[in-house]
């Protein structure tokens, strides 16, 4: 069966940390990622973004990493998360 994926899910899939968190919470909640509302997905994106700003969090450490590729990846994800939230927040 061919399922048409909602645009918000396609966009979320392109942001590694957001996709990873959605997979984790869907497993914990015993539901499919597609079952989450747009508002729930945006709330998760907001949470992931906050983790990049939280001192002591692994994602925050990535932003300050001495490894340029790690730092650049983290910066791209922060930028993508901000754009995602602006686009999909109701």
Image (cartoon, rainbow, N blue to C red):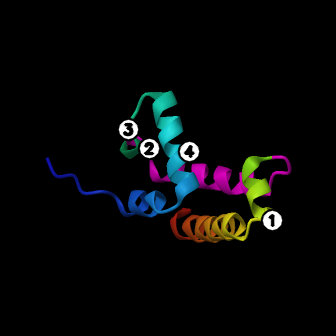
Q: Nearer the viewer, residue 76 or 29?
A: 76
Image coords of residue 29 (percent x, y): 48, 29
Image coords of residue 75 (percent x, y): 69, 69
Image coords of residue 60 (percent x, y): 78, 55
Contact between marks 1 and 2 (CB within 8 A): the answer is: no
Whether residue 44 is in magenta: the answer is yes
For the record, the magenta segment spans 35-56
Res 66 label: 1
Residue with the most extreme front position: 67
Q: Which tag is nearer the camera, tag 4 or tag 3?
A: 4
The residue singled out by tag 4 in the image is 21
User: Would you call the spot at circle 4 few (<14 residues within 10 Å), some (14-19), or many (20 or more)?
Assistant: some
Whether residue 76 is in magenta: the answer is no
Drawn side of residue 55 relative to residue 45, left or right: right
Sooner in the amino-acid sequence: mark 3 or mark 1:
3
Main secondary structure found in the magenta portion: helix
Sooner in the amino-acid sequence: mark 4 or mark 2:
4
Q: Secondary structure at mark 2?
A: loop
Q: Give the CA distance from mark 4 to mark 2.
A: 13 Å
Q: Is residue 63 above or below residue 59?
A: below
The residue singled out by tag 2 in the image is 36
Q: Secondary structure at mark 4?
A: helix
Q: Secondary structure at mark 3?
A: loop
Look at 43% across and 60% down and name the residue there: 8
Image quarter for residue 69? bottom right
């Amino acid at each position: 069966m061919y399922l048409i994926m909602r645009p918000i899910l396609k966009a979320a899939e392109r942001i590694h940390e957001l996709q990873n968190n959605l997979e984790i919470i869907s497993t914990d909640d015993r539901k499919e990622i597609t079952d989450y509302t747009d508002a729930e997905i945006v709330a998760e994106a907001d949470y992931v973004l906050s983790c990049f700003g939280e001192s002591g969090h692994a994602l925050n450490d990535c932003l300050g990493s001495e490894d340029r590729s790690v730092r650049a990846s983290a910066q791209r994800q922060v930028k993508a998360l901000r754009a995602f939230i602006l686009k999909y927040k109701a």
